[in-house]
Every structure is written in structure tokens, then in C-alpha cells.
Amino acid sequence: MSSLEFDRPATRWLESLPLGNGALGAMVDGGVPELRIGLNEQTAWSGSPRSESSAGLISAAEASIALAASRAAIEAGDPVAAERRLAAAQASYTQAFLPVGSLIVRRRTGMADYRRRLDLSTGVHELRSGDLRERVVVSAPHGVLALESTAELEAELESPLRELGRRRSGDDLVVLLRLPSDVAPGHEPGFPAASWSDAPGDALEAAVVVRRLRDDGRGKHLLLLAISTTFAALGRSPGGTAEDAAEKATAVLDAAERDGADAVFRAAVEDHAALFGRSEIRLAGAGPRADAPTDERLRRAFGGMQHPLEIDPGLAGLLFDVGRYLAIASSRPGGLPATLQGIWNDSMQPPWSSNYTININTQMNHWSAQVANLPETAEPYRDLVLALADAGRATARRLYDAPGWVAHHNTDAWLFSNPVGAGRGDARWTAWPMAGPWLVRGVWDAIEFGAGDEEAAALWPAIRGAAEFALAWHHRDGNGAWVTSPATSPENAFRTEDGVVAAVDTTTAMDQQLLADLFDITVRLATRLGHEDDPVALAAARRAPLVEAEPAATSDGIVREWAVDRDEEDPRHRHLSPLYGLYPGPGRWSEQGRAAAAATLERRGDDSSGWSLVWKMALWARLRRGDKVSDLLRLLFRDATDDSGPWAGGLYPNLFAAHPPFQIDANLAFPAVLIESLLQSHDGIELLPALPAELRSGSARGLVARPGVEVELRWRDGALESATLVPRKPGTLSIRYRGRTLRLHVADAIQLTPSDFEGSA
């Protein structure tokens, strides 16, 4: 059993416990006698599709002049002038994912023998205090939040949104709301925090309906809650009114009430457990009881001189479970993908708008989906990419006179595809039209892990369109060199010979690796689907040899991030963009490339933001360096409330990961990184390639390797005891352990031990 346990109520949001069904999110503080549950709904975004162009967009003619001038300035050696010209292409900012409100529940009870617990395997929050017994679940099958209690309940709703109306109707409290028409990011104080409009289509409306059902004859009281908005679909204008939303929410509650509390809880648990139970990692070693209060476990592990996982190795398994739990709770088929904060946000002006940041973070949110046996949680990401591929076509044509589609640094539920920045954004995070190739890598993972031809055919238009744009963007400069000018390396910068900080160049290592990966994916998918003669596929095959799948090294041995050796503005920068091709890219680098990658990681240093720590772990795992994975685990497993710097990651009391502040990408990607230490399959299957010393003994089941093989592992004292491989379809597998490789045709389950590798090459 895997759970988060506390012997006191939460005193702040980062001690509350998250519930979710992919659409409805809840943060439960466990308070007595007053319980507060923060509420989110996946479609509750500010703005509308009109927001992207509300401040005006540059015309195609103006964009052409600006792009030509920028390229000319780069060739002339004046990147600062190039950046000034690019600023004209910036639109405003993406919209924000917002809270809906808080449910306040009051009971006549006191504190005694208190315990609250979130069972990660069932998704049920349980609370006891004296005679009070209470459970809360957010049900995917029924679409409701259900709270069952032994105490009589009084409920109220608070909301930071604009209230259009409130009424009590029988057992129901109905609250009608309007969301803002615009919310600027908090890092832009020159814009109003929120703007409101009553004009039809400018903003969403919503309804929250709370139903109170008294004693059911078994001494139980029930609250049911549903939320609906006027969101229609990704990129589409809102439709309907708050009253329409209230009707939908009421119908959802009616269905749940007809089935009854037991059926609602049973269906929710069965649905969640079916997903959560697919995989597991158990780690042996001394430590506190698994049901010890989580904050007590954290204090013990974080407070000593030893490695936290040497004190309590089970914490790694717990964080693995938390990551999978949060993926199931925040990203379900038919919905929207997890934002920077999943579906849990309590701020009307959240950090970085709690949007989709698509130069690493949105992609990272879904790294675990395939390997942790939760492909369903990647479906909303796939849907976002397919929709953005349509929305980004007009932007590609207007800004760059290019076919295909483009997206930049950020997007939102309205499919924002222009550069952000409102004309004054820094080029290092605005002038990057390469999100498409990286987004494609994320959907291609499903194919590599065994998705069928129907899925492959559905992805073809988006992948083809990304390649079509890339072929136009990749061009010869005035010197005849193939470049991606103006090129940036996301959020990083360099110093010119004059000491000026600049961010644009003729090309970058990341651009080259993204193009190489995209062209390879395009050709492979075209071949699979019988589109070998498609002009884009043919062009991608011809162009592929002209890009660098593996980067060159600088004179001091690190990966060359820019077109030539540059003086780094920040040698310890948190983004690992020039190592994309190692992970999450194809990863098949030469020994020279791997040595340069290791040198780059050493240069960047270990400490960083939570998501950066996790990316570094994945990269070190790809380099088979379990010792460095261990070093980074020490930094991830630390108290994030002890502020040790603006980019220092760690864990909050409820095991949310810190950017800081809270950002969910490290949580959602951690299962993938732990698996990468135990099992790799980017270049054949490799067992225990980068096992950290603190995790020397354990077992795992339900892990998934390419091209669709379920794997069970047992290891002791750092050595493999057994591996069971179950292919989803027959095929020949290359399986490696400690430098020795077996090639086997596998049609059914096979079990291997170290002796099977003896005598192999």
C-alpha cells in the first residue's frame, strides 16, 4: 500500500493533498471542524481564442521585413540588432489556468486522535478525528467530487471569479461564475493582473453545483459536487452560458445520486486502481514504517548527513507512486493535458500562467506515460499537438512565409502559437520556432512503444506538417552553410566578443538535433504508412544528412551549444537544450558525443530547479552513471521550504516538487527517470544500466520497454537476480546486461538470470 499520511491538518496549500479525475481537481486540507477543498477544473482558463490577437498581430509583409533584417544582422555579426528586429513579431501572452474556488465544509466535531491519509492506489482521501470518519474521492466514472461523512455537513462555496448568481434549490447550492477575459503573467507587472468583459465569447462562464444529502439511514451524510464550464474544445470559442453549465453539472449530480454513495466510491476506486496497479517499484532497505506520517519520514530523511535514500530508500518508490498518481489524476483521455501545475492551482495569477510551456515542461510532463504503463495519460498531450498543428499553420505562413505549422515557447487551451512577449520579451524565450519538432518527439514515443497503425495514421498530418515547416526553416545562409537562423537555445544566452549578452545565432546544437530527430521520424512513419513517395518524406530523407544528429565539442570538450564556440553567460544554466538528442531524443550517441555530454553536465553542475534535476538524472542515466543519478537524487529529496536559491528544487510536505515554486513536471517525469536507471530501450533493451547505490536491492513490475515489452525485474546488492520479459507481439529483441548482449526471438514470456548472459558478446 502506498499512501501519504499526516497526523495534523494542513496549514497551507502545499500541505493539502491532491485529488483528481483528469478534469476536476481538488486540494483537501483535512481541516477540523472546518474543511477546505480547493477546486480546479481543467477547462477553467482565462480568455478565449480572441486573446492571442487582441493586442494586434504583425502582418505577413511586416514579418517578412523583420525576419530578413534579423537574418542580415546575424550574418553581419550583430545579434543584438537581430533580436530588436525579431521583437516586432511578438504577440502578447498566453492565457492562464485558474482556480474555480473553495468548498468549505463545516461539521460539529473536535480534534482527537487525528489522522488524514491519501491512498495513492485508490485515489481516496480518508480522515478520522475522534468519532468523525470521512472519505473524499474525485470520480472519473461519475465526474463528481464525493464526500461521505459520519457528521452532519454544512457546505459553502467561495470563488475568486466573478459571481453571476447564487441560489439554493432544494438540496443544491448553485453558483454561476464568469472567468476573466485576460490574465497577464505575474512576471509582467506592467499589465493589469486581470481584465473582465461581458461581451459574448470573450471569456468562459462556469457553474459549481453542490448537493447535500442528509443521513442515508446508515449514519452517513453525503456531499456531491460537479463543475461545468462553457469551454467547447481546444481553440474553439466558448459556447453557452453559466446556466447551461449549471444544467450539465446538475445532470451529472443526478446520475451520481441515483447510483448512490457506495457505487460512486466503488466505481472511482476500480477505475483508478486499474491504472495505478499496472506498475510498481519496491525498494528494500531500512526505514520507517510505510504508514508513518509523511512529514515525519521527510524530516528524518532530510535532516541527516547521509543520503536521504540511504536513510529511507522507500521514499524513491513513494515518489514514483506520487508521479504516477498525479498523472492519472491530472491527464485523462478526452480532456486537456496537465499544465505546469497539473490541475491544481490556487492563484488568480499563477507562476508562468500555469500554462503549457513547450520548450521542455509540457513534454516532460508526459515522459513517464509509456514506460510506466500509462499511455492513456498521454492522449490529451497527443490531442493538444494535433490541434496545435492546425492552429499553427496560419502562424507559420504569416510570420515565416513557410508551409507546415509552427509553435514557440508557450501555448494554452486556446492554441496560442505566436511568439510571446508583447514586443519587449527577451529573445532567449521568445524567438524559438522549434516547439513543433519537440512536441512530435512526445507523440512519436507512442509509436516506438508499440501503438498500432490507426494511431500512426492519426499522427501523420501533424508530423508531416512539422517536417514541412522545418524543411523551409532549415536554409542556406549567405555563406552557403545550412542554418536555422535566427536560432536560439531555449532560455540561454552567450556573451559576444564585446561582452554583450545575446541569444540568437545562425544555428544551435538543439536545432540541429531536433531536425535530425524529426526528419528520421518523418521518414520512418512515411515508410510504415506507405507514404515513401510523399514529397515531404523524400525531402526529409535528402536533408537528414545535412544536420548534426550528434553535436560537435568545443575546444574545452563540452557540447557546442551555438554555431561556434561561445562565451557562456551562465555556465550553470538550468536548461540542457544542447543534450536533447541524448534524452529525450534517440540517445544513440558515439563515445565522443557521450564524453562531451558528460563534460557538459559537469560544467552545468548538479544543483538546479526540480525539473532540471530530473532532466539531468535522465541524461546521467543514459550515460550509465548511477553514481551521478545518486548525486541528483540527494538534491531532489530535500526540503523545498528551506529556500536555498531561486533555482533550487526539492519537495514540499505533500511531495509536490519545487521549481521553485511548485511545478508538476519534476513529479510527473520522476517515474520515467527512475525507470531509466533500471531499464533502457532506446538502443535495444538494457537491464539495470544506471542503478544508484542507495537503491541497491528491490523489484519492479509492469515497466515497459520499446517496442512494447512488459518487464519485471528483481535485483539484490546492485546485481540482477532475474528479469521477466513479456512481448506484446512476437519479435527479435536485443537484451543487454553489464556489457553482454543476447539476441532472442521472443514470442511468449521469458525469464532471464545473469547466467543467461555468460558467454554472450
Image: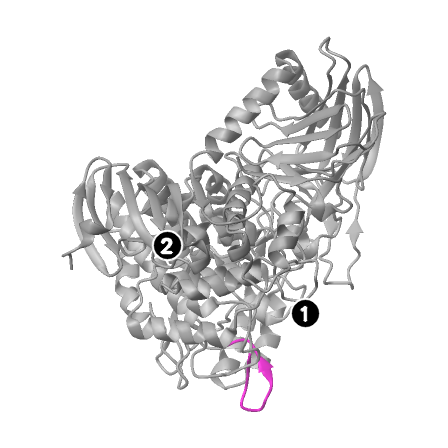
**Image coords of residue 633 (percent x, y):** 52, 60
- Classify residue 740 by image quadrant: bottom left
- Classify residue 707 by image quadrant: top left
- Classify residue 750 by image quadrant: top left
Left or right of 11, for residue 584: left
As drawn, the label of residue 717 is 2
> In this orientation, which residue lies closer to the viewer: 499 or 316?
316
Residue 371 appears in the figure? yes
Above or below, 414 against 739 in this view is: above
Above or below, 304 against 487 in this view is: above
> In this orientation, which residue lies closer to the viewer: 696 or 617?
696
As drawn, the label of residue 416 is none
The overriding secondary structure of the stretch rendered in magenta is: loop
Which image quarter holds the C terminus? bottom left
Residue, disc 1: 424
Q: Earlier in the sequence, mark 1 or mark 2?
A: 1
Residues shaded magenta? 494-504
Residue 24 appears in the figure? no
Residue at figure coordinates x 55%, y 26% from the top left? 269
> In this orientation, which residue lies closer to the viewer: 464 or 54?
464
Mark 1, other Cα within 10 Å: few <14 / some 14–19 / many ≥20: some
Front label number (1 vs 2): 2
**Image coords of residue 489 (percent x, y):** 50, 70
**Image coords of residue 474 (percent x, y):** 39, 68
**Image coords of residue 726 (percent x, y):** 28, 38
Q: How many marks?
A: 2
Residue type beneath disc 2: Asp
Q: Does the magenta stretch include residue 500?
A: yes
Residue at figure coordinates x 61%, y 16% from the top left? 262
Q: What element carries label 1?
A: loop
